[in-house]
Image (cartoon, rainbow, N blue to C red):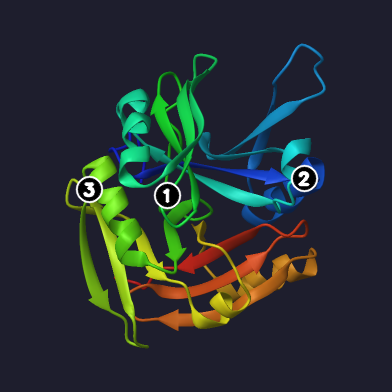
Amino acid sequence: MKFTSHTQGAPCWVDLSTTDQAAAKAFYADLFGWNCQDNPMDESGEVFYTMAMVDGAFVGGMYEQPEDQRQAGIPPHWMIHLAVDDVDAIAARVPELGGVVGAPPFDVFEAGRMSFISDPAGAYVALWQAKDHIGAGVKSEPNTIHWCELLANEPEAVTAFYTQLLGLESETMTMAEGGDYTILLADGLGAAGVMGMPEHLRERGVPAHWSVYFQVTDVDAVVHKAVASGAQVAMTPTDIPMAGRLAFLLDPQGAGFGLTQPESK
């Protein structure tokens, strides 16, 4: 599906903070067939922000992880960006709703204005107010963003946070394997999911976090290709009712990302 704008609260962009930008670019370009464009970020010409494209439409970005993140022990990760209409107004409400503003709103050249926040569970997410760059120009097509999901120990609390902060609605269903799954709705359409932290991850002390799932035409084939290129499997391909076939991987630098093959309609 092509996009010229994104509704407030919907994931509009993802980008990868990685410890080896060149290797990550090669891995994802080969895995998803992305065409990549390097954009200089400073006058030295040595720091780049890579923009990935599918059929000429932007789908995501990647950059070399800053030294302060490495020193803090933050692993490579995909950051989810949620579209907002007024980032300054939204960020101002974050503390009163129990979140933390990690980086106050700032301009990204003429592309847009953004802020980094963490919700009451501690999960980090970016807020993006578009100017020249709306974010992803295509989603829910092969090799593009299909779904973003938040795992947290207290899903009800974070659901309340995002619905109040962004003016979203929510609906909760019981999954076939047990447990609840909440869908955040933007203008009545499913925007993202919220789920309780699975017990095996909770036992390992995995913190609350957002994840991205990229749509593919054959999950099993893509998993095989990714593993051959150095990725590790965190969740083997699994059929999930109403969601399709899913898998979750760690790329060669350790960043987690999901794959989804939606059920045929």
Residue that carries the numbered disc 3 in the rendered image: 168
How many numbered dots are placed on residues in this image?
3
Q: Position of residue 131 (x, y in %)?
A: 41, 19
Label 2: element kind: helix
Q: CA distance from mark 2 to mark 3?
A: 34 Å
Q: Residues within 10 Å of mark 2 (few under 14, many from 20)?
A: few
List x then y, in percent, for residue 211: 51, 58
Tell whether label 1 touches label 3 (CB within 8 Å): no
What residue is shown with label 1?
A: 119
Observer-nearest residue: 242 or 171? Answer: 171
Residue 186: percent from the left, percent from the top?
Answer: 23, 47
Q: If you read the primary sequence from the N terminus, does the residue marked by circle 2 or circle 3 appear first?
A: 2
The label number, if any, that marks residue 244 in the structure image: none
Residue type at the position of mark 1:
Asp
Residue drawn at the location 63% of the way across and 76% of the way down: 204
- Answer yes or no: is residue 65 visible: no
Q: Residues within 10 Å of mark 3 (few under 14, many from 20)?
A: many
Q: Nearer the viewer, mark 2 or mark 3?
A: 2
Image quarter in which the C terminus is found: bottom left
Q: At 73% from the left edge and 16% from the top edge, which residue is drawn?
A: 42
Whether residue 73 is situated above or below residue 149 in the rendered picture:
above
